[in-house]
């Protein structure tokens, strides 16, 4: 965990090496309010970025990693979300005089999420840790320093005990505030 924090801080401090279009940002820190967390987004090229979101929130429980589940029990747990995004409509948005500030645009990518021990609410999982990976499609829009992100896609999930499965539609909604960017 300490190495991850050092890497994230190092990436934020590094000077941009690859030039970006006006309006796009090299690195962005966001504070998310839905599924509270802190997100760091780093552009790896003019139209792609990697985001890391660490927080604690309401998540869906996976069928094959849940031993006992009360009816419609939510999962409240810490999470680590790593998302690679390719933003494919910067040029189209600019040609229509729409903003690309703070990397606003439509994207597709791949997402990895890890989740920790859940709050005791009657939900008993097969393991305290589970993981999921899958392709995503989504949108990000920004209004001054306010940010909205929505993405959706299928996920393959697994835990450390060998339980696994496929979740056909998983979605994410984040509403946040941009704390810093460069």
Image: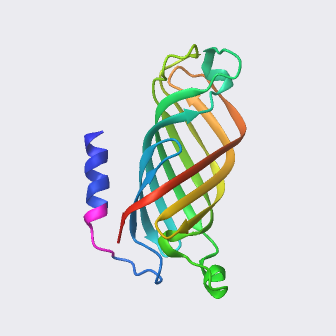
Residue that appears at 44% across and 67% down: 43
Question: For the stretch drawn in magenta, what is the main secondary structure?
Answer: loop
Q: Is residue 49 above or below residue 3?
A: below
Please give left or right for residue 176 compared with residue 179 in the image.
right
| Visual colour scheme | rainbow
Q: Residue furthest right?
A: 168
Q: Is residue 14 magenta?
A: yes
Give the x, y percent position of residue 96.
67, 85
Give the x, y percent position of residue 147.
52, 61
Q: Which residues are magenta?
A: 12-16
Q: Is residue 38 above or below residue 119?
A: below
Please give left or right for residue 31 compared with residue 167 in the image.
left
In the picture, the quarter occupied by the C terminus is bottom left
In the picture, the quarter occupied by the N terminus is top left
Q: Is residue 86 magenta?
A: no
Residue that appears at 46% across and 66% down: 145
Residue that appears at 60% across and 84% down: 94
Q: Is residue 86 above or below residue 72?
A: below
Give the x, y percent position of residue 79.
47, 37
Nearest the eye: 146 or 23? 146
Residue that appears at 56% across and 34% down: 58
Number of callouts: 0
Nearest the eye: 117 or 121? 121
Please give left or right for residue 14 compared with residue 58 in the image.
left
Q: Is residue 2 above or below residue 44?
A: above
Give the x, y percent position of residue 7.
29, 53
């Amino acid at each position: 965990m300490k190495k991850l924090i050092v890497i994230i801080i190092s990436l934020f401090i590094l000077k941009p090496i690859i030039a970006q279009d006006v309006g796009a940002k090299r690195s962005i820190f966001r504070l998310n309010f839905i599924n509270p967390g802190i997100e760091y987004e780093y552009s790896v090229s003019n139209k792609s970025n990697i985001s890391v979101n660490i927080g604690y929130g309401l998540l869906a429980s996976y069928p094959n990693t849940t031993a006992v589940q009360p009816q419609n029990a939510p999962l409240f747990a810490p999470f680590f979300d790593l998302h690679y995004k390719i933003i494919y409509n910067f040029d189209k948005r600019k040609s229509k005089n729409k903003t690309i500030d703070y990397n606003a645009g439509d994207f597709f990518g791949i997402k990895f999420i890890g989740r920790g021990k859940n709050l005791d609410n009657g939900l008993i999982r097969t393991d305290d840790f589970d993981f999921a990976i899958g392709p995503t499609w989504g949108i990000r829009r920004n209004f001054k320093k306010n940010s909205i992100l929505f993405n959706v896609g299928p996920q393959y999930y697994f835990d450390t005990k060998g339980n696994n499965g496929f979740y056909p539609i998983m979605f994410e909604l984040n509403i946040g505030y941009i704390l810093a960017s460069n």
